[in-house]
Image (cartoon, grey):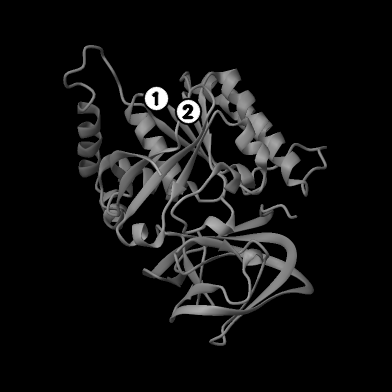
Amino acid sequence: MKDYSRKFIDTIEVEDWQVETDNGWSDIEAIGKTIEYDEWILKTKNGLELICADTHIVFNEFGDEVFVKDLQQGDIIITKKGLDQILSITKSDKKSNMFDLQLADENHRFYTNDILSHNSMWLNNIAVNAANAGINVLFITLEMGWRKVMKRIGSMRLKINVDEYDEKSKDAIFMKQRLNNLKSQFNVGNLFDSQPGKIFVKKYNTSDCTVTDIDNYIKKFEEIKRLKVGMVIVDYINIMSIEKGFDITNMLYLKGKHLAEGLRRIADKYECAVVTATQTDKAVWGASDIKLADIPESKAIADTADSVWGIIRNPEMKRNNIYRLKILKLRDGEHKEEQIRFDFNTKFLTMENDVLVGAK
């Protein structure tokens, strides 16, 4: 068992550098350098080779993220030339520093040696909908750059095509009009003087953020801003760090228990909702159904949460830009594993047209 976090020792901001992605060439905003990690060597049937860390992310034939360490001989991944089959996965006896690219490209995916490599859309949508309901949201990102998070949220909330956002956001008059349009929605037909909530983004380096860091930041934030935080979103719990002095890094159950109970204490202390995400087991990636037992890394995360929802997207749904949410746990109430269907709007990155489809 390993800690799936990345410990960065340096961040280098760059200009005029690009990398090829499945959407064309994308600007590189920064390069993160990590501590040394074991080298894993991935080889494919068509002769491609990649040296990377165990938790380097590639994409399977369904377009889902997969850790290199979880791949097996015969698995299919996406490459520049199409689908390719894994020939071998080998852990070498060498260690080296790894480098992670922060891209301007919205998908945060790029080709490394012609293999499509890593990227949180649902958490962004939750933040936007909460703010539009009048709740102040603190979005804590542990992996994606804060500019990228703000771009996604801006596209969703202001209804600006994500492909046009960089250019449109430079037009002050256009942006002011969009903001006024947003505010006007709260003044039509309301009995009370309601206001849209605000979204604030805080970036921590991967594996550097502890529960205490979040606690201290919320306390200082509310004191300085004089605003009540109604929701905290952590993207995401598995790449948080444990408190100093706790030697449980490689014990996934205890680590999950430590982090989940810590986030729950924050929710109680500040009387706010805390939302985060975790991964399902590899066996159900691309499946048409998932269960609570399919959360593999730490059962303690699911045990501690008041509510757990599963995100379902099989290959057919992916082709049709459809998602389903399935309720897996509801502490205060009964449920029958109901599901809600959503259309995914690729222009604005929003989940729309929600329909209750019942239990499956």
**Residue that mark 2 sits on:** 231
Does residue 352 appear anywhere in the picture?
Answer: yes
Amino acid of disc 2? Met
The one nearer the camera, 175 or 337, is 337
Query: From this viewpoint, which residue is outermost toward the top?
Result: 191
* Callout 1 secondary element: loop
Q: Residue at x 43, y 50 (%)?
A: 312
Answer few, some or many: residues within 10 Å of disc 2's Cα (few below 14, many 20 plus, some between 14 and 19).
many
* Callout 2 secondary element: strand
The x and y percentages for residue 223 are 54, 19
The x and y percentages for residue 16 are 44, 68
Query: Counting residues from the N terminus, which is met first, the one under dot 2 or under dot 1?
Result: 1
The one nearer the camera, 229 or 176, is 229
Q: Residue at x 71, y 35 (%)?
A: 258
Give the quadrant of the N terminus.
bottom right
The one nearer the camera, 102 or 339, is 339
Looking at the picture, does residue 314 appear above or below residue 22?
above
The x and y percentages for residue 147 are 44, 48
Q: Within the image, what quadrant is residue 27 found in?
A: bottom left
**Residue that mark 1 sits on:** 135
The x and y percentages for residue 50 are 61, 77
Looking at the picture, does residue 80 appear above or below residue 65?
below
Check contact, mark 2 vs mark 1: CB within 8 A: yes
Q: CA distance from mark 2 to mark 1?
A: 7 Å
Answer few, some or many: residues within 10 Å of disc 1's Cα (few below 14, many 20 plus, some between 14 and 19).
many
